Image: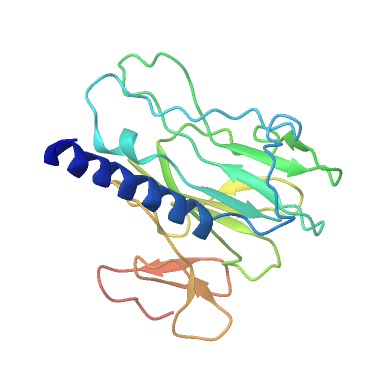
Amino acid sequence: MSGKARYLWRILFLWFLCVWAVNVHFAAPDGVVFTDVTKAAGIKFVHFNGGIGKKYLPETMGSGCAFLDFDSDGWQDILLLNGSDFAVPKRRPSTAALYRNNRDGTFSDVTRAAGLAVEMYAMGVTVGDYDNDGDDDIYITCLGPDHLFQNQGNGTFKDVTRAVGLGCADFGGSAAWLDYGRPNRIAHPNPTRGSRDGSIAASRGVASKM
């Protein structure tokens, strides 16, 4: 066997050794097994990036998702964000999908009934109770205007983006809620500040006083 052949066999052996070591290191512990139950659970959502062959940045990033208890029944529901068509005219409509937990391992699509069948190119989502009424509210960042959906406490949401002074019109990625300035009042960091009347005051760089 030539020196070159021995060298190649050594490289191949080391490669197999590395693969084996990685598999051993990341192997699931005994008794831990994951099964894909998407179809059985009734989740039919398919993400649409709206691509038209231009490879725009948003279509390569995918969209966010969130677990939340939007109906306050103690069971986690699922919100899946979606893209939107870049083609003009649009080839198809697309919206986010809200799946309500049926408490039996399955979910039901309640997007339209909940008032979330709003077309947007959604990117990120954060869940928080900004108006301190005990219900999960939703803020969605988008390619284009963001959306703040206020939980009405009856299984539905209302888009209050403009009413509270929010709505970045450009390109939003991720988002987060925080308790800024005063205890027990979360705000969305534009930066912004929440108030007890459900409104949010915002300014460029500095939060205004309420």
Quadrant position of the N terminus in the picture:
top left
Residue found 33% across the figure and 46% down from its top: 13
Q: Quadrant of residue 61?
A: top left
Q: Position of residue 40 (x, y in %)?
A: 76, 31
Instruction: Specify whether residue 103 is in view.
Output: yes
Quadrant position of the C terminus in the picture:
bottom left
- Using the image, determine if residue 100 lies above or below residue 162: above
Q: Which residue occupies the foreground of this view, 60 or 178?
A: 60
Which residue is situated farthest in the right direction here?
104
Residue found 74% across the figure and 47% down from its top: 155
Image-based side of 177 in relation to 135, left or right: left
Q: Position of residue 126 (x, y in %)?
A: 51, 58
Image-based side of 37 in relation to 146, left or right: right
Residue found 58% across the figure and 33% down from its top: 117
- Using the image, determine if residue 132 lies above or below residue 209: above
Q: Which residue occupies the foreground of this view, 147 or 19?
A: 19
Q: Quadrant of residue 127?
A: bottom right
Q: Position of residue 84 (x, y in %)?
A: 41, 28
Q: Which residue occupies the foreground of this view, 111 or 19?
A: 19
